[in-house]
Amino acid sequence: MFPPISSHAQKVIKTLEKFVNEECITNEERFEKELGQGSQRFKSETSVVEELRVKAKGLGLWNLFLPKDFKEGPGFTNYEYAYMCEIMGRSQNLAPVATNCDFPDSGNIELLAHYGTEKQKKQWLEPLLEGKIGSAFAMTEPDAPSSDATSINCKLTPTHGGYLINGKKHWITNSGNPNLKLLLVMVRSGKSNEEIAESSVKSGEYSPHKQHSLVIVPVNSPGLSITRPLTIFGFDDAPRGHCEIIFKNVFIPRENMVFEEGRGFEVVQRRLGPARLHHTMRAIGTAERALELLIDRALKRKVKGVALADMGVITEWIGKCRVEIESARLFVLNAAHTVDIRGSKAAKREIAMTKVHVLNSVLSVIDRAIQLYGASGLGQNTPLPEMFANIRSLKIADGPDEVHLNQLGKNEIKEFKIRTAGRSKL
């Protein structure tokens, strides 16, 4: 049984729905026009986004994501925020950034709020909460498989007064942001994988999950180069983008360590759990909008004088979409509620199942909508291709489906052995 939604949350949900439908969706074409062409797309924030952020602040639609146990947050539960995030997912390019709830800032804010020192909070958390600066989370590397984060090799080396960073990251979301001021960077601060492999001990100082740290790197640090924006299925996601970043003897002071050296995985898990959940929350809204587009097309498009909506196979598609969306929403709400009552670490199972199931369900809905539009569904006539690209990329981001499924399977086998120990028959 899910808990009731507070009266305050209900009021915000109603206000947010009106804001997204009447302000964000209606300004999507203006947003694209203001971005311009080529390198101009990353020069500055668009005026429409700035206007929407002012409106959102005035309506109290700001930093909605921080759970109620954070003093910096608005006091909502993850369960309540799930409903809000779904609404924002209807306008994936405008609503999250307009409300200062966009990723990766939301995850970075939660991480700094939990682990940051008072100085780090003053310097970085406060301006992030105010929406004055942007941040990025630099973890993915071209030579490290994303299915095994212990292979991350961007090197952190101690030096007088601090550390030096050397390495390369890619597909770093929000790193094209003209307001970008800091990176949270996952680095190898301990032993190499070769040293660990050669050791017979795999715990303590030789534990694969004790070799990394998370550090704060100001974007204007000498030796840091944001070399080029990378596209996802041809979309550049300007002006925030996904860029390639090179670190060449980048110096940071010791005070830029987040929490403690060698505890990067512990810190990152605090961030990745909610981040995965926020992605799936927004994905439900994306699916709802895709279904609306599908039904609108089915009603208006005729083949030999018959509307597509009057054809049995199309109504069956619509029915399947509704089943997939509703089941996906239940996964999201269950995971969010589990995080509220047990914490994100204890909810790893629910979060993993949600990430896998929801994204695949949403992709099915979007794919049917594209199919119904035919050639028009492949180009710039509808937001469907960008929806598809965004959701498809999330099946890789924050851990590929296969990693989550593998761990879920192992846990099932482990629980089965415990549950059936001593039984003569099943």
Image (spheres, rainbow, N blue to C red):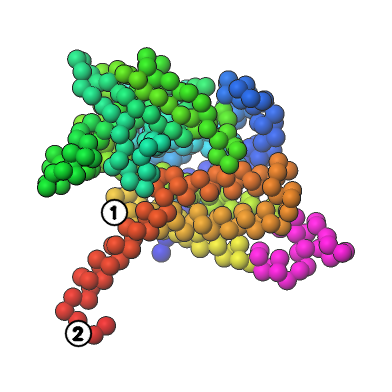
Q: Residue at x 33, y 63 (%)?
A: 409
Q: Which SS class for mark 2? A: loop
Determine if the magenta segment contains residue 250: no
Q: Which residues are magenta?
A: 295-318
Q: Main secondary structure of the magenta part?
A: helix
Q: Amino acid at mark 1?
A: Ala
The residue lying toward the viewer, choosing from 282 and 146, is 146
Q: Which residue is mark 2?
A: 424
Q: Which residue is mark 1?
A: 346
Look at the picture and state if 243 lies above or below 22: above
Q: Amino acid at mark 2?
A: Ser
Tell me the number on the disc at residue 288: none
Compared across the picture, whether 155 is left or right of 84 comes to left
The residue lying toward the viewer, choosing from 259 and 36, is 36
Determine if the magenta segment contains residue 316: yes
In the rendering, at what x and y percent does residue 50 appear? 59, 25
The reply to whether callout 1 and callout 2 are in contact (CB within 8 Å) is no
Q: Earlier in the sequence, mark 1 or mark 2?
A: 1
Q: Quadrant of residue 268?
A: top left
Q: Residues within 10 Å of mark 2 (few under 14, many from 20)?
A: few
Look at the picture and state if 242 lies above or below 295: above
Look at the picture and state if 381 lies above or below 173: below
